[in-house]
Structures are given as C-alpha cells and as structure tokens.
Image (spheres, coloured by chain):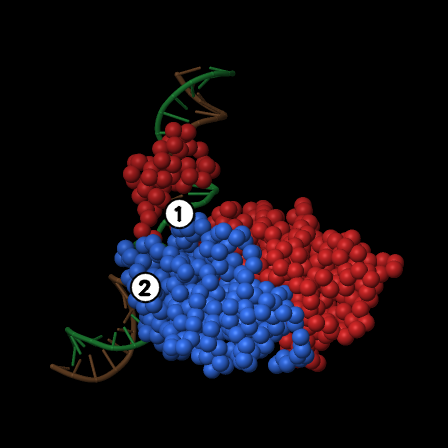
Chain colours: A red, B blue, C brown, D green
Amino acid sequence: MARSGPKLTRIARTLGVSAATVSNALSGKGRVSAEMVEKIRATAAELGYVPSQAGRALRTGRTGVLGLVLPDIANPLFPQIAQAIELAASSSGYGVLIADSRGDVSTQTKAIERLIDRDVDGLVIVPRRGTRIADVGCPVAVIDTPSTPGNTVAADHWGGGRQIAEHLKALGHRRVLIIGNNPASNVQNDRAGGIRSVFGEGTHTDTLWIEPLEKVAGKGCPLGLADMVAEGYTAFACISDLHALRALTELQRAGINVPEKASVTGFDDLIWSPVITPALTTARMDMTEIAAIAVAALVKAISERDPSDPAIGAPVTAETSKVPMHLVIRQSAAAPPAFQPVHTTVTAATSVTEGGHQP
Amino acid sequence: MARSGPKLTRIARTLGVSAATVSNALSGKGRVSAEMVEKIRATAAELGYVPSQAGRALRTGRTGVLGLVLPDIANPLFPQIAQAIELAASSSGYGVLIADSRGDVSTQTKAIERLIDRDVDGLVIVPRRGTRIADVGCPVAVIDTPSTPGNTVAADHWGGGRQIAEHLKALGHRRVLIIGNNPASNVQNDRAGGIRSVFGEGTHTDTLWIEPLEKVAGKGCPLGLADMVAEGYTAFACISDLHALRALTELQRAGINVPEKASVTGFDDLIWSPVITPALTTARMDMTEIAAIAVAALVKAISERDPSDPAIGAPVTAETSKVPMHLVIRQSAAAPPAFQPVHTTVTAATSVTEGGHQP
DNA sequence: ATCGGCTGATTAATCGTTTAATCATGCGAT
DNA sequence: ATCGCATGATTAAACGATTAATCAGCCGAT
C-alpha cells in the first residue's frame, strides 16, 4: 500500500540532517547526540512517521511477521489460541499471518510453504496428532504437549488430567469413564493418562474413543452412556468440552440428571461451558501464558539468528515448557448417587433442582 | 527472512539475459518473445524461484496481504470465517493478517492501525453491533447483514429467519419465543425480524434478549424457559446455536424433553450442533461463498486503485451482496405436543425415545 | 606543534523487483 | 536507398530503509 505517511527522508529534510542520522536516532544504533535524538523523535512523532515494512524488510531480511499454523482450524479452541498468539506477537511488534490446512496434511504443507514464501520470520505450529514438522527454513515454536519431543511449550495436560481426576475422586467417584476422540493425539493421551494415574486400587477406569466408534456407528452416533450408568459408571471425564457437551446432552436426554445421577467433566473451558445447564466443570489452559512463552522463544531465536545463514527449522526451546492448567469447578460434577450401583434401566427424571447457577 | 531461493538476477544470469526481461516474461507485461518466455518460465520453475514480497512490495506499493478484523474474536463463528477468508484470499494469491481487539473499541482501532501500518492492501471487517468503520486508507469489505448501509456482502439473515420460522410454523407451532443476545446487533435483529415476519394472525411471538437479562440476573443465569413452556410457548427460536445450546440444556435439566415437549432451533451450525442430543436444527450461512465474494470485491478494488492516490476507506461493493442461508433440519424441532397448552408446572421426563440420530 | 583518538554526522552502497525510457535490428513501403 | 515502424531486448532509475565506511572537527597528550 502506498501509505500516506511521511518517509524517512522527509523527516531528515525537515530537520536538515541526513536520512542515516534519522534512522540511527530512531533505532538507537549509530552515534547520534542526545539532543538530536530528541529532536528527531519529536518530529517523527509529530509527523506520524511509520517505517515502511517493505523497505525495512528488503534491507534487513526480516519482515516482522510470524506465521500461525493450526492444522485443525475448525477446532473450537482456535479463537483462544489465535487471540493469545496475536496478543503476544503484536506486543512484541510482530504481525500474525494465518494458514489453514483443513486437516489435510498436503494442504498443510502447502500452507506452510505459502507462509515461508511470504518470508515470515518464524512459525508457531500447533500440530495435530503428531504431525511431523518438515524442515522449514525458519525458527519454529511447537505447541503440543510436554511429553512430545520437540515441543517448545504447552499446557501441562497430564497435570490437568490429574486435577480433574483428583476432584472427581474427592467427590467420591470410583468408577469413571474417560471419553476422548482419538488415541493418536498426544494431547488427548496425556490428559487421559493423567486421569488414569490418579485412580488406583479399588477404582476402575475405562476409555471410550469416539472416532473409532463413529467409524462403525456413523458420525454423531449415540455414545451409549445410559448403559454405562447402568453398569455403574458414576462419572464421565471427557478429554474436551466438546465431548463433555455431547455426553451431557445424551445423558440428559436419557433422563439421567447431571450431576445428581452422573458427573461430567471436560477440558479447555470452551465458550459455551459457563452458560449451559449445568455449567461445566473443566480444566483450562493458560493460553495467554503459553502464547507469551512461545512467541518470546521465537523472537529470541529470530534475533539471534544470522539472517543470511541457511538455517534449518529445528523447533526452538524455551526455559519453561510446561504451563499448569487451572481447574474450573462449576456444577456438572458432584458426589455420586449414595448407595446405588444402578442396575435398573433408564429411569425417568425426577426432583429437578431449580437454579443453582453462580455468576 | 533471508530466503534461500534464487533471485531474479540469478535466473537472468543463468540465461544470459537481463533481469528486466525475466521480470517481464514472468509477469507477461513487456514485450518478450514466446520462446524466451518459455525458457524463462522453465528455469524459474526448475530453480524454484519465488519472488521476494519485500522487493515487490517496495516497488509496487502492494504487499499482497489482506487484514482480517473480527471485533469479537471469541465468537464461535470465528473458525468458520477465518477459514473461509483464508481460503478465498490464498487462492487469489493474498495472505491474511489477523487483528484482535478483545471486544474493546479502542483496542480495535489500534488493531486496525497496526494492520494499516503493515501496509495491508485491503481489509475484511466483520463488525459487531454497528461498529463504525473509521476512514482507513485502503479498500474495505464489510461483512455484516444486507440491511446495513455500507455492507459489502453477507448472509441473508432475514431470509434465514424466515426459513426457520416457516419450518416451525409448518410443524404446527403457534407460540414461539425468540431468544437473542443483544438487540443492538444488526445481524440478530434481522434474524429475529425474519422470524417474526412469518408468524402473523393467530400466532404469537415474543423476544428474550439475554444480555439485558444478565445485566440484572448475572452471567449464565437461568433463562426461565420452564415457565415459558408453562405459559404455552412450544418453540424457542434462538438467534445463535450458542443460545440454542443454552436453552436446550436448561430445558432438558428442567425435565422438558426436546423436541417432544418443546422445540429448539439455532443459527450458524456451529461445531457442536450435529453431535449433541438432540442434534440441533439450525440455519447455516455459506461462509465460503460470502468470503469468496468479499475477497473478490476487495481484490478488484485493489487492482483498480491507483496505488498513489490518497484513497478514502469507503467500503467496496459487490454485485451479489446477499447470500442465501441453508436450513439444516435435524432433531431438535418437531411438532408441538398434541392438545395441551401445558399449564401444569414442570413435569418429569417420560418415554425417552432412544436413537433417532442421522449420520 | 603534531598526531591519535573520539564524537557526531554524512556518503554511498545495498536489499530485489518493477517499469519507463532507450536502443538495436530487421523488414516493408516509399 | 532511405525512412518509418514494429519487435525484442537492455539500461537505469526508483521504491524506503539500513549500515559499513568515511569524514570533519575537536580535545588532550606526547
């Protein structure tokens, strides 16, 4: 865009100095007298000077733009992530270019290439199901899960699982069903693992993976949770709020009140979680923190990097690579029904408790 | 980024011609012999030449980047929109830079300024609640609702409302409650208006706005839908799937089966809508189409624009400005209960129908 | 008195592409 | 034989910033 703003030379001419001096004053690099710096700063601000990224990029080889790659952009977490990354990036003076791959691997590769072709300075990648990061020619920050090799920073999914499980255990649950989507996901496995690790002797956990089930039963098929309740499961620990929502509505539909008859927990604290009835008890990642660490690591790698070297795309590392999750206790999990490993079939809903929401 | 790829001069030297000829050949602009063009194309492809955006941007004043502004990035529609815009933009050779404003107006203005400072060629703005588009210095495509002045292209929200309402009416509903968030939103008003326009003589509609209600009753407060059912409302036409979800779970919790005792419909076909029980009947926008039109209009305006003129930021216009919505019929809406303007209080759930999901 | 070193600024080259202006050449028309 | 013209290519300037190299003073030390 031909920006309206004044160029560097314009400021220089206005003060009767050379463009180089202005550049030095603004960047604080060369040798410029304090008073000159002051004058230049002032007029630059007054004239509303904004450096041309194009000019700078051409000369320095840095565009000041980061690429954000989310293999699964339809993921309901996307808004949170995008928002957090954008915030972190912009406060470090970077712009964020998005890439979409609609889940497809080859499309993803193309998307990354487009970003590289646009000369991004670095990449933030949130891989899905252990995607291998091809050798791109710039620093890469990977946000997956701490147990994944090459991970830069991520939420402590395992720890989050433990928190959820401890909460459930403390409430008195002994028989819980873990509900996830796909066992190939590192994140989901860690969350499930964390949950399992808490339930030991005298308890029982099993895991239901939705995707394999849908392969045979069709998309959106019933999960058969009423049967599970009949089998004595008192809690459903879902790996994502999306699954929790699915479980909750299926239970409610079957006349099984949540949390009186069965508890449901989720993960991620998605947008709808606070407003449904009952509001969802869940574990939330601190995306702001995660994004800040990822971007900081990236920025550091970028500035340390010799812009002219061939540079392989090995993931950057950060000091902190594991950010704790926060347990959000709402109404969907409570003590299990008193003395009844229910073996009757689905019963009608009774004694509905009104209200009970917290602001 | 100092890209590894070869420069224009490299190709030129390889073939013993001048850089200008290569540039002309590749862009098809100047006068170059057919065979020369062919040779240049070939070696460019072979060497994997990718033009430097920085160099080009500096010379032409065009960066090949579009800015995407969504005042409410937390909106669950964001993934759909971002995906569609990114697809449309990238197939026109443009990149997409995102801006976030966390709902705040001044933050939004800053975000837009950052995009402008980065020399975006154009802006796609999805305004919230009649945000005024300040005079930015580049073409702007506005995606709001057809009834808004300055709108470039949008879904036919009013028509979508009609479709939902006609479906409900055909099922036999005569007393429906419209549930929206905020009456200040153009989109929500149009959807509600479309619904109302269908229900005439012998029917009754009323509207519940959530935001004003939450101002007094607190966030996530109950909507009091059980009472509404008691008052004879048989259907709840929600302005967004998010509200539909809230209504559905509240009804289920109160022991009111959906759709047997009350129907619920939504808007937008959000990610969870197909997998909850009962699956949500809703109206979906064709974001792919909308994004394509918006980006096409923007690209046209950009190419027609003299890169050196001062340029005011008036919204661009497209030939088609209204894209029809699609009714998605699932299980959450059915005929109202036979002969009973229910005046009893909340009743227990009975006769749960199992299954009934479609793939 | 002269030289070395420091300070504060300038010069000029450079990044990679586009494009207006120029140039050389061959061919048909006068 | 010469002029004009179309064709195919080259030259050179420009876009806006950064930065290495250079330069003019000036002060203190030998």
Residue A287 position, x and y percent, is: 60, 52
* Amino acid residing under circle 1: Pro
Question: Residue at (72%, 61%) from the top-left corner?
Answer: A260
- Numbered disc 2: what chain? B
Same chain for marks 2 and 1? no
Question: Residue at (39%, 69%) from the top-left corner?
Answer: B193
Asked whether residue B155 appears in the rendered view, the answer is no
Q: Extreme right residue here?
A: A201
Q: Nearer the viewer, residue A335 or C27?
A: A335
- Numbered disc 1: what chain? A
Asked whether residue A309 appears in the rendered view, the answer is yes
Q: Nearer the viewer, residue B298 or B108?
A: B108
Image quadrant in which you'd find residue B64: bottom left
Q: Secondary structure at mark 1?
A: loop
Q: Extreme front residue here?
A: B344
Seen in the picture, residue B277 relative to A47 is either above or below; the reply is below
Question: Residue at (80%, 69%) from the top-left corner?
Answer: A342
How many marks do you count on the picture? 2
**C-alpha distance separating marks 2 and 1:** 31 Å
Q: Which residue is mark 2?
A: B150
Q: Secondary structure at mark 2?
A: loop
* Amino acid residing under circle 2: Gly
Specify few, some or many for label 2: CA neighbours under 10 Å numbering under 14, 14-19, or 20 or more: some
Residue B104 position, x and y percent, is: 45, 50
Q: Which residue is mark 1?
A: A51
Specify few, some or many for label 1: CA neighbours under 10 Å numbering under 14, 14-19, or 20 or more: some
